[in-house]
């Protein structure tokens, strides 16, 4: 049986048709749509069904936001999703909603060797695992190991309080507190966070980037423009921005790993890590990850891998639906 699966993010929404098997998920007709071009997920689903000419009785949608009582309000989109309402409006026999990082966690079991890239080998043991994903926002999920298999579960850990550890980070916290009132980890470890770090460092250092770069940052994908300038070493502020970003990414991934006792592995999802894999590997990410005082030896036993398979949330949504 084919089911419709979706991965709804603040920037783009991906849809596809999935068939589940014991050790794999087959996807077909995958398509992406700019989320901001639509008033609701219903509109995207209708467009997809019209374009593909397909029909499905069941669907599962991974959403970047908390899910309660079959409902969700997207964190970085002005959308409210209601599974019961979608069943009636779109004619599905069943609709499931789950957090997008929970979906990614469900997808880990069907990823192959080429779907992940190693950052730190650690020690290969069975145990709890976690996923930390910097994309438009910052998502986090855990996987509890019961001795036989993993049980994925959602968290909203990306919205926990950001804690500064040195003079520069204290100044960053003060800068963002003035801008937002409350400073979460998502404000610094995400695509939106990259722009926040850049704005802070530009002001704190008193250095202005070239006008062409400022225009590119203001009018397009700011995170991509900053990362590109950093890789080309054409902008000192951009270079420092990405250096700080990866260090903070490592810090928060390490925080999540400690809280989950993730001896089974730490997986980096989202769009930023796979697009900047070489930069991440040569950055201070692992310094931030290992820097846990007396627990540093424990941190070094935890494998760290980047998920380079962009369809992992779709695969996970299909596995979640099959489990129901």
Image (tube, grey):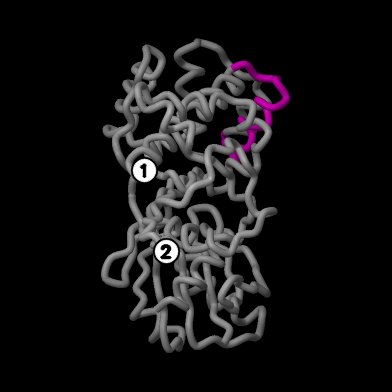
Q: Nearer the viewer, residue 278 or 66?
A: 278
Q: Residue at x 64, y 45 (%)?
A: 117
| Residue at which label 2 appears | 148
Q: Is residue 37 visible?
A: no
Question: Which structural element holds mark 1?
Answer: loop
Q: Quadrant of residue 297?
A: top left
Closest to the observer, 300 or 41: 300
- In screen coordinates, is 135 left or right of 97? right
| Location of residue 164 with respect to 48 vertically, above or below | above
Q: Quadrant of the N terminus?
A: bottom right
Q: State the extent of the magenta-drawn residues as a range.
A: 218-236
In percent of width and height, residue 246 lies at 53, 29
Q: Nearer the viewer, residue 141 or 218?
A: 141
**Residue shown at 61% from the left, 30% from the top:** 226
Query: Is 230 a magenta residue?
Result: yes
Q: Residues within 10 Å of mark 2 (few under 14, many from 20)?
A: few
Mark with earlier residue (1, 2): 2
Q: Position of residue 272 (x, y in %)?
A: 58, 42
Residue located 39% across and 21% down the image: 172
In the rendered view, tell whether residue 69 sits above or below residue 199: below
Left or right, residue 217 beside residue 151: right
Q: Can see residue 203?
A: yes
Does the magenta run of residues contain 148? no
**Residue at the farthest right position:** 232
Q: Which mark is residue 261?
A: 1
Quadrant in the picture for residue 56:
bottom right
Residue 139: x %, y % from top left:
42, 48
Look at the picture and state if 66 lies above or below 220.
Answer: below
Q: Which SS type dominates the magenta stretch?
A: helix
Label 1 packing within 10 angstroms: few (<14), some (14-19), many (20+): many
Residue 245, horizontal then vertical, whole percent = 51, 29
């Amino acid at each position: 049986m084919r089911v419709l699966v979706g991965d709804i993010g603040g920037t783009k929404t991906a849809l596809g048709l999935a068939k589940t098997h014991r050790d794999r998920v087959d996807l077909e007709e995958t398509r992406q749509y700019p989320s901001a071009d639509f008033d609701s997920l219903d509109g995207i689903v209708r467009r997809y069904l019209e374009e593909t000419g397909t029909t499905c009785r069941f669907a599962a949608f991974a959403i970047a936001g908390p899910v309660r009582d079959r409902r969700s309000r997207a964190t970085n989109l002005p959308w409210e999703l209601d599974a019961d309402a979608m069943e009636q409006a779109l004619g599905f026999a069943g609709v499931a909603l789950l957090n997008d990082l929970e979906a990614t966690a469900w997808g880990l079991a069907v990823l192959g060797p080429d779907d992940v890239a190693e950052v730190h080998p650690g020690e290969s043991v069975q145990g709890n695992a976690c996923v930390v994903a910097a994309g438009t926002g910052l998502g986090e999920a855990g996987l509890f190991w019961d001795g036989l298999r993993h049980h994925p579960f959602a968290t909203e850990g990306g919205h926990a309080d950001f804690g500064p550890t040195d003079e520069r980070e204290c100044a960053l916290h003060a800068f963002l507190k003035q801008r937002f009132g409350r400073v979460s980890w998502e404000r610094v470890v995400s695509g939106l966070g990259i722009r926040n770090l850049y704005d802070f460092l530009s002001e704190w250092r008193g250095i202005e980037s070239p006008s062409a770069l400022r225009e590119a940052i203001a009018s397009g994908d700011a995170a991509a423009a900053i990362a590109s300038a950093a890789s080309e070493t054409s902008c000192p502020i951009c270079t420092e921005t990405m250096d700080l970003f990866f260090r903070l990414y490592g810090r928060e991934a390490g925080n999540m790993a400690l809280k989950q006792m993730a001896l089974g592995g730490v997986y980096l999802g989202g769009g930023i890590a796979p697009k900047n894999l070489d930069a991440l590997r040569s950055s201070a990410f692992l310094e931030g990850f290992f820097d846990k005082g007396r627990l540093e030896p424990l941190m070094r036993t935890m494998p760290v891998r980047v998920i380079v398979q962009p369809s992992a949330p779709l695969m996970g949504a299909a596995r979640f639906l099959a489990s129901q």
